[in-house]
Image: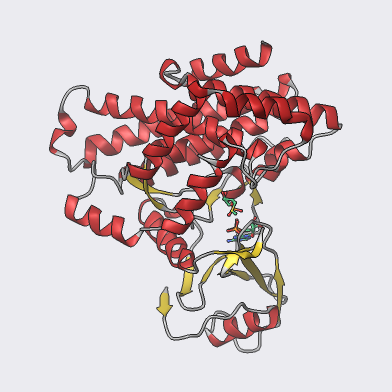
C-alpha cells in the first residue's frame, strides 16, 4: 500500500477512475476495464472497476467535499478519506480477515483503493431478504473485541495511545453523530424526517425529560470518553457478509470513543431488522445479539488476560466492571440508534420498505417505544437475556 500527496482534488469520472487504475498498474496494460459508480451510501462516490476478461476488480472510494445525501449545501471535510484508510489499516493489524485489503490511498484526491467485495452482500439487504448469515455475529463479536481492546489503554502504552488519538481526531464526522444520533431526534429540529402519523409518538419523546436526561449523559460519553478506536458507524449497511465470510467497511467515522457505542450500534441495527419481521422470525436476530455479546466477552477477556498492558488488569473485578459498563452503555446507545433511524435524517430500509403503510407506522411506533425504554432502563438491563425480555415486554404492552 502506498500513499501519494501531490495530486489536486477533483471528483473522478468513471473514465478517470479507469485511467487512474491503469496509471497505478493495478491492472495489466492491455486489460479491458469497465467502471461503474455504485455508491448507495449517504456520503461518498464508490467506483467499481472490473477486468472484463477475468472478472477481477477493485473499488475506488472517493470522498466528496460535501455530504452526498444533502448536496453542496452541507460541506464536509475530505479528511474523512484519510481517517477511513488509516482505520482500515489499523483494524487489519488485529483482524485482517474482517476488513477489505487497502491497495492504495491518496489524501489529496481523498481516495482509498481497496479489495472488491462484490462476491458478498451488504448484511442489511441480506437480513431484509431473510438470510440467516450464521457466522455474522461470531465474526462481528471478534471484530469488536479485537479492534477495540487492542486500541485501548488496557492494551496500549499510554504515550502511543495518545499519538493514535491525535491521528484519529475526526471532529466533522463526530459532529454528524453528535447531531443526528444524540441531539436532533430529541428536539423539534429541521433535519428530522418522519411520517405525520408518528407526530404524537415523536412529541412524547420531545417531552420526556427522563429520556432526555439519559440521552444527554450518553452524548456526554460520546463526546468525552476516548476509550478505544471505534469504527464509529457500525450499522448493518457497513458490513458485507455471506454464510462463511464477514467484512466490515466504511470506518470514516472512526475516532477514539466509548467501546459501548460500536457494540450498541450493532445491537440497535439487529433490533431494527427484528422489528421488521413477524414474531416467529425474530428469534434469529436476538440470537445474533446474544452471540455478538458472548463472543465479544470471550475474545475481549482472552485478549485482556494475555495482552493487557494496564498494571491494574489483574486486579480482581476490574475486567468484569469494564464489561458491565460496556454492556450498559451499549444498551443506551442501541436505543439512540433505533430512535434516530426511525425519525432522524438517515433512515434504514428495514423499516422504510415495510408495507402496507399502516404496518410501517405501527412498526415505527414500536421501535420508538423500545428505543426509549432501552435508554431509560440501561442500568437494569444486564445481559442479552434481560435485553430480549425488555424488548418483548415493551412490544407486548
Ligand atoms: N470494498 C467494496 N467492495 C464492493 N462494494 C463496495 C465496497 N465498498 C463499498 N461498496 C459499495 O458501495 C456502497 C457504499 O459504500 P460505503 O462505504 O458504505 O459508502 P458511504 O461512505 O457513502 O456510506 C456499499 O453499500 C457497497 O454497495
Ligand atoms: C449525513 S450523514 C447521515 C448518516 O450517513 C452515514 O451513513 P453511511 O456513511 O453508512 O451512509 C452515517 O450513518 C450518518 O449518520
Residue 348 position, x and y percent, is 68, 42
The colour scheme used to paint the residues is secondary structure
Image-based side of 244 in relation to 81, left or right: right
- Quarter of the picture containing the N terminus is bottom left
State the image quarter where residue 296 is shown.
top left
The residue at the point 53 percent across, 55 percent down is 249
**Residue sitting at x 51%, y 19%:** 387
Which is nearer the eye, 117 or 391? 391
Residue 136: in sight, yes or no?
yes
Relative placement, left or right, of 173 versus 369 is: left
- Look at 73% across and 30% down and name the residue there: 199
Task: Give the side of residue 173 with respect to residue 393, left or right.
Answer: left
Task: Say which of 129 and 349 sits in front.
Answer: 349
Q: Is residue 6 above or below residue 220?
A: below
Q: Compared with residue 315, is residue 69 higher up or lower down, i.e. above or below?
A: below
Q: Measured from the top left, where is residue 11 in percent x and y?
A: 61, 77
The answer to whether one can see residue 135 in this image is no
Query: Among all residues in the image, which is located at the extreme right?
Result: 356
Q: Where residue 161 sits in the image (x, y, percent)? A: 24, 53
Query: Is 348 on the left-hand or right-hand side of 247?
Result: right
Counting from the top left corner in percent of width and height, residue 359 is at: 81, 27
- Total labels: the figure holds 0
- Decide which of 140, 14 is in the foreground and name it: 14
Vertical side of 109 occupied by 337: above or below: above
- The quarter of the picture where the C terminus appears is top right
Q: Residue at x 34, y 27 (%)?
A: 325
Amino acid at each position: 500500500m502506498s500513499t501519494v500527496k501531490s495530486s489536486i482534488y477533483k471528483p473522478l469520472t468513471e473514465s478517470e477512475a479507469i485511467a487512474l487504475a491503469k496509471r497505478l498498474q493495478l491492472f495489466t496494460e492491455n486489460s479491458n476495464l469497465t467502471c461503474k459508480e455504485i455508491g448507495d451510501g449517504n456520503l461518498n462516490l464508490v467506483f467499481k472497476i472490473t477486468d472484463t476478461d477475468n472478472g477481477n476488480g477493485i473499488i475506488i472510494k472517493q470522498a466528496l467535499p460535501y455530504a452526498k445525501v444533502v448536496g453542496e449545501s452541507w460541506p464536509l471535510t475530505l479528511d474523512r478519506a484519510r481517517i477511513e484508510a488509516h482505520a482500515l489499516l489499523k483494524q487489519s493489524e488485529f483482524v485482517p480477515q474482517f476488513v477489505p485489503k487497502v491497495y492504495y490511498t491518496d489524501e489529496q484526491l481523498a481516495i482509498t483503493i481497496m479489495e472488491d467485495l462484490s462476491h458478498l452482500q451488504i448484511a442489511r439487504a441480506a437480513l431484509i431478504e431473510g438470510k440467516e448469515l450464521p457466522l455474522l455475529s461470531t465474526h462481528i463479536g471478534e471484530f469488536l473485541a479485537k479492534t477495540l481492546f487492542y486500541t485501548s489503554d488496557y492494551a496500549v502504552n499510554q504515550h502511543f495511545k495518545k499519538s493514535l488519538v491525535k491521528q484519529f481526531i475526526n471532529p466533522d464526522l463526530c459532529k454528524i453523530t453528535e447531531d443526528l444520533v444524540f441531539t436532533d431526534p430529541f428536539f423539534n429540529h429541521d433535519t428530522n424526517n418522519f411520517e405525520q402519523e408518528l407526530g404524537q409518538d415523536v412529541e412524547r419523546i420531545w417531552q420526556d425529560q427522563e429520556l432526555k436526561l439519559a440521552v444527554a449523559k450518553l452524548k456526554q460519553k460520546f463526546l468525552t470518553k476516548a476509550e478505544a478506536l471505534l469504527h464509529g458507524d457500525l450499522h448493518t449497511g457497513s458490513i458485507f457478509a455471506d454464510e462463511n465470510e464477514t467484512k466490515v467497511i466504511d470506518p470514516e467515522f472512526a475516532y477514539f470513543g466509548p467501546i459501548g457505542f460500536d457494540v450498541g450500534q450493532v445491537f440497535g441495527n439487529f433490533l431494527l431488522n427484528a422489528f421488521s419481521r413477524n414474531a416467529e422470525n425474530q428469534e434469529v436476530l436476538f440470537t445474533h445479539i446474544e452471540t455478538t455479546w458472548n463472543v465479544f466477552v470471550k475474545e475481549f477477556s482472552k485478549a485482556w488476560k494475555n495482552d493487557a498492558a494496564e498494571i491494574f488488569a489483574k486486579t480482581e473485578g476490574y475486567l468484569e466492571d469494564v464489561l458491565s459498563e460496556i454492556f450498559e452503555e451499549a444498551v443506551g446507545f442501541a436505543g439512540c440508534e433505533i430512535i434516530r433511524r426511525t425519525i432522524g435524517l438517515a433512515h434504514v430500509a428495514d423499516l422504510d420498505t415495510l408495507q402496507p403503510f399502516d404496518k410501517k407506522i405501527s412498526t415505527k411506533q414500536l421501535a420508538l417505544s423500545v428505543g426509549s425504554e432501552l435508554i431509560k432502563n440501561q442500568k437494569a438491563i444486564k445481559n442479552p437475556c434481560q435485553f430480549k425480555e425488555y424488548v418483548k415486554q415493551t412490544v407486548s404492552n
